[in-house]
Image (spheres, helix red, strand yellow):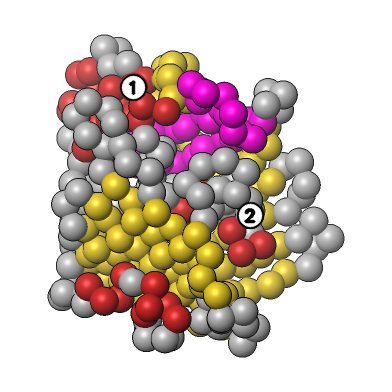
Amino acid sequence: MKKLRLLTVSILVALSALAGLYAQELTGEEIIRLAHEIPEPDSSSVKAKLLIHSKKGTEKTREVIMKSKNYGDVTKEVIVFTSPKDVSGVGYLMFNYEEQEDGSKKDSENWLYMPALKKVKRIASSGTEAEGNFMGTDFTYEDMGDRSISKDTYTLLGEEYAGGVKCWKIKCVSIEHTESDPERVVYIGQDDYLLYRCEFYDRHGALHRVLECSEIEYIDSYPCTKVMKMQNVQSGSWSMITMSDVQYNTGAIDDSVFTVSALEQGRIR
């Protein structure tokens, strides 16, 4: 679902009265569409720390900068690792296209730059490559981008609390059923339409990963999920992203930032 990606989980607050009035009438798909359709900032700039906890208990810390800009029909985003030295300069560039009224959606375009190899690699938007772990974390490349609503069927399972918030619990099942995790159960806040929890189930129906979103703050009227923790319950590893220095619509971000050449030249700071 939209905004599992690292950059901005930013949705304007929906009226709680609306949620109460239509809680029994909305379908699972309608709730998902409402969450997708609420406006987002035109641009964002974020610094974040990434903690990777292995199944053996060892930990690694990474620091990244993330920038995004909305161009109407496409949102361009870039993630660049700044420390430690062995990953500094590694960058991931994404072009996420908007879904059309007829449900069609152009596949995202993704590029990974590895400075040690001085090489840019295209990353597929779906399939085995997209399902691979993003830079050794428990997040996948597919988690970084938007997922088209038309890729899934939706069933409203009921209401349940997640992170102390009353949510709609919705099962999302891939139509093609080819992904390693073809089923997800998402928890969407009834008062704000924000994502608070997502459970990923593998092809055997076993729980694989769990995403928990917390410490939501409002910045310039936009909510920002400052902590996202993805746990692999099958392996015992987990990864946590903690946002800091979040800035929305604070000034124009140069278009050249969202290019492969900017990654190669180390110009993104």
Q: Which mark is residue 29?
A: 1
Labelled pair 1, 2 in contact (Cβ < 8 Å) = no
Q: Is residue 210 above or below residue 42?
A: above
Residue farthest to the right? 56
Quadrant of the rendering where the C terminus is positioned: bottom left
Residue range corresponding to the magenta coloring: 174-202
Residue that label 2 marks: 133
Q: Amino acid at mark 2?
A: Asn
Which quadrant is the N terminus positioned in?
top left
Q: Amino acid at mark 1?
A: Glu
Q: Quadrant of residue 105?
A: top left
Label 2 neighbour load within 10 Å: few <14, some 14-19, many 20+: some
Q: Residue at x 63, y 30 (%)?
A: 201
Counting from the top left corner in percent of width and height, residue 74 is at: 25, 52
How many neighbours does mark 1 have within 10 angstroms: few (below 14), some (14-19), or many (20 or more)? some
Dot 2 falls on a residue whose secondary structure is loop
